[in-house]
Amino acid sequence: MYSNNVDYYRATSVADAVKMLQKNKGAKLLAGGHSLVPAMKLRVAQPTMLVDIGRIKSLSGIKAGKKEVKIGALTTHATVAASAELKTACPILSEAAALIADQQVRNRGTMGGSLANADPAADYPTLMLALDATFTITGSKGEREVEANKFFKDLFTTALKSDEVLTSITVPAYGNMPGMGGAYLKHRHPASSYAVVGVAAMIGLMDGKVARAVVVVGGITGNPMHAVAVESALAGLEPTEANIAAAADKMDIEATMGDSYASSEYRAHLAKVMAKRALTLAAQRAGG
Amino acid sequence: MSKYVGASMKRREDPRFIQGRGSYVANLKLPNMAYLAIKRSPYAHAKIKSIKTDKAKKLPGVVGVFTGADTSDVGMLPSGWNVPGIKVPANRVLQTDKVRHVGDRVAMVVAEDPYIAQDALDLIEVDYEPLPAVTDAKKATEAGAPQVHDDVPNNTSYTWALGDKEACDKAFAEADKVVELDLINQRLIATAIEPRAAVAQWDAFKEEMTLWTTSQNPNLTRVVLSAFLIGIPEHKLRLISPDVGGGFGSKIPTYPEEALVPWAARKVGRPVKWVATRSESAMSDTQGRDHVTHCKLALRKDGTITGLHVATWANNGAYISLVASLIPTAFYVTLLSGLYKIPGIYGEVWGTLTNTVWVDAYRGAGRPEAAYVVERLVDAAAREMKMDPIEFRRKNFIPASEFPYQTPVALQYDSGNYAGVMDKAVELSGYSALRAAQAEARKKGRLVGVGIAACIEASGPVPSKVAGALGGVTGFWESGGLRVHATGKVTALTGSHSHGQGHETTFAQIVADELGISIDDVDIVHGDTAVITNGMGTYGSRSTSVGGSALVRSAEKVRAKMMKIAAHQLEAPLDELIYDKEQGKVYVKGVPSKAKAFGELAFAAYTAHNLPEGLEPGLEEDTYYDPANFTYPNSVHIAQVEIDRDTGEVTIQKYVAVDDVGKVINPLIVEGQVTGGVAQGVGQALWEHGKYDENGQLISANLLEYAMPHAHQFPPLQTGRTETPSPHNPLGVKGVGEMGTIASTPTIVNAVLDALAPLGIRHLDMPLTPEKIWRAMQAKS
């Protein structure tokens, strides 16, 4: 549990951090340090320099508007879990954040850090895909925005370039919209507390029928995926128990992840069961 | 009336722990200290063809790099418990020819800091020739299995059998019904919160070594190091085990690192420190359990148990650890009678070697394995006989009137009231309401189960004569000394060691009451061989029954000497004096005003101005207490679980633990021990598994994979007690450290199988993970 030799630099601004990343090819950003530091201790990650952005105040905080909520990349899981604004505007995020790891990790781990790491067993990527989130990224050429469905490229791989900093995440304030409901369910690994399977469901109701259904499954493939067959099966129908069950049964994402705790076959089964339960909960909330 | 014994006192040691001010080995920093790291094998089984250390030696900051060729002056790691016929293979502190498990030791580095040491490890080049590995306790004995040691044929280090074979065979020949099970009691990793660590300092002028080490038994470790390993005479070797963060058995054995660190300190002439990483602990600390068992129960038509036959293959790992051969023999087969009257019991054990990390005592150590066999069989039998599992157990309990009870497997149970414990558990759990609720739930298709286990433990090991007869190399007494100071304050010395048990509180309660003084005037000292000359340490729930009893005996001696001084000074005959344990004074019978206070007598003992003729000054007494028998804590635990039909997930809805641990010194600590113990046992039932793949890779070598219990997985625990004092120790205590762990594992497995019974599922092996249960349900649907 002793890392390789590594230089440390405390960045004073995002521009400063970008400059250091450009100058040092082996550099990595350090935010909460709850994914990177353990990986370094196991010598799985071996950066030559840590560029610490943890004290850049402008990267932290939640700004809720009527239609959108903008969350600074350095906002901790604990802040997201406790945020009154999010509980109203985008409650699924608070619900999910409260399920991440334990209180100590939630106090340090950041939303941006988790997303940039793109761990297939993380919770946030699944949520962001379900919410059609937008990622704001700053690099040497200025700022750009990337949609969630273009952000996650593969296991531990994102659209971020080596000299770019994820600065904020924008999600819809669906809690302010009538007829919208969401739910996140997680099968927690008994050791790591990571998601073995995580399912985010969103339901938009119009005149008692499902105008829009979103089901995103994390943990069974390298990056989270929409369960398109389930989503389309439910569209236009009333969210009855039978309709939801029939739609969830259409889950057809091929599970590629598996380990000694949960095989890919079991994960695929869990995805189906959890999709049904998450959709049921989301529909209830949409109706309420 | 005792002032302190029986009171729920908060632990005196907790303020420092809660505030992060404990002083652990890893906290120690000495001037000019260097850091040691160990190069470990990535293979489960391989020949070492060559080890090249030149690159590592050249790394700036490296003080030294050493291999087994350098440490050839260190002795072999010994076995401290030798059952008859045992073959103990050679085990060097650094291996030279072959590695036999992932994590086996091939070289070490001493460097200026732990980071450089780690970098240097990466520069050591070891050329291995990988060999086929065997990990399964039973498969290791089969023809064609890879041989772990050339001089241990069939990988069988020892075999052991106990019981009445004739009576057992007869029971099965005449049985109306036989219930059989194949059980795997899986490998566990102890995972004490504090990883092992050692710091050594050599004084070249005095030729004295001081070793700070995370041991449950520093005196015992000193003997082993001195006599077998590093050749430093015992009086020149000081061991200090300061605050130690949990052991669970894994800090009993003498470890190679405890020899390597002092060896390196002497070699480089600097203090040397080694602290295990979490992954390193997982692959080098002794692990627990790992039995493959075939067992069967013989029954009469009316549900009377007449016989039990058990055949167990016990995995010892790659080498024989310090007391490894004790655990699956005298701590296992002897417990197979459980709480039941079974005329014909016969148990056979094969102690095998495999390419896995070595196995030794782990909380309960053999006794949980025995309880699991008995309680799984009893539950299965009750189901087969269509009897309520509680009624079935009651029918077969040893009645309270038959104590002392001689079992067919060597032990003599001294006391007990098992029906009384059962009554209390039934009442506390609302058993009939649980069954009614279960019937309702089943109607709705819900999978609700109620599980019971009724268990016994043999605690407080071991009468030294018995240990000697069974293969023990040492005795198993305990030392307890009292140093009464001239000012009336008391330092109590114990050879027991606290690594979470709360000795500083419990033992102070005992001593204060025995002498009739304030608990604030008593300090407990443990864990330093310079102060505690001899001791046996803490394991097997022995501290209070053996170590506490030693202190009681010393207090009796202190009181006796004080009486003599008082008699002299009060000019009264000795038999007219009374030692008032409430007030802490000696007075003349019928004349309470004619008295000498504890402080006055202590002072008088040291001024020595006016002592009886021939009485030595001073007030210090020592005792070596050898227990007359084991103690026999027993328990009934009842749990209710529900299984998610769709996912196989288990939720514990209710847990009731009723334990008879004899007289209770501190109910708060007892409650804590039961709570922690239950959680640990449930950990085995549902989550924990030290898992090796077919190549012997330990795939649960870190806490991302190895699932420890979490608080949120438990409902509030309901505990209850009955108190049947142990008849043979002065405190009447039995020990509480392991009972929770022993009982909770079968309780939860029985509850899960009860929930699954309507589906026709009779058996699952632990841990009962959701996927395992889901697959079993799938197979039946």
Image (cartoon, coloured by chain):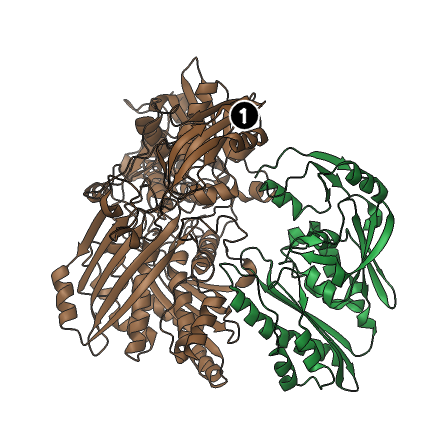
Chain colours: A green, B brown
Residue at image point 75% right, 75% down: A181
User: Residue B423 lies in what quarter of the image?
Assistant: bottom left
Q: SS for tag 1?
A: strand
Rendered location of residue B637, percent (x, y): 40, 65
Q: Which residue is at the front of the view, B27 or B166?
A: B166
Q: Which residue is at the front of the view, B725 or B21?
A: B21
User: Which residue matches tag 1?
Assistant: B111
- In the displayed structure, does residue B191 sit left or right of residue A160? left
- In the displayed structure, does residue B375 sit left or right of residue B686? left
Q: Is residue B460 visible?
A: yes
User: Residue B399 lies in what quarter of the image?
Assistant: bottom left
Rendered location of residue B129, percent (x, y): 39, 38
Quarter of the image that includes the C terminus of chain A: bottom right
Residue at image point 33% right, 73% down: B390
Rendered location of residue B68, percent (x, y): 38, 28
Q: Is residue B570 visible?
A: no
Quarter of the image that includes the N terminus of chain A: top right
Task: Name above or below for residue B399 compared with residue A163.
Answer: below
- In the displayed structure, does residue B739 sit left or right of residue B668? left
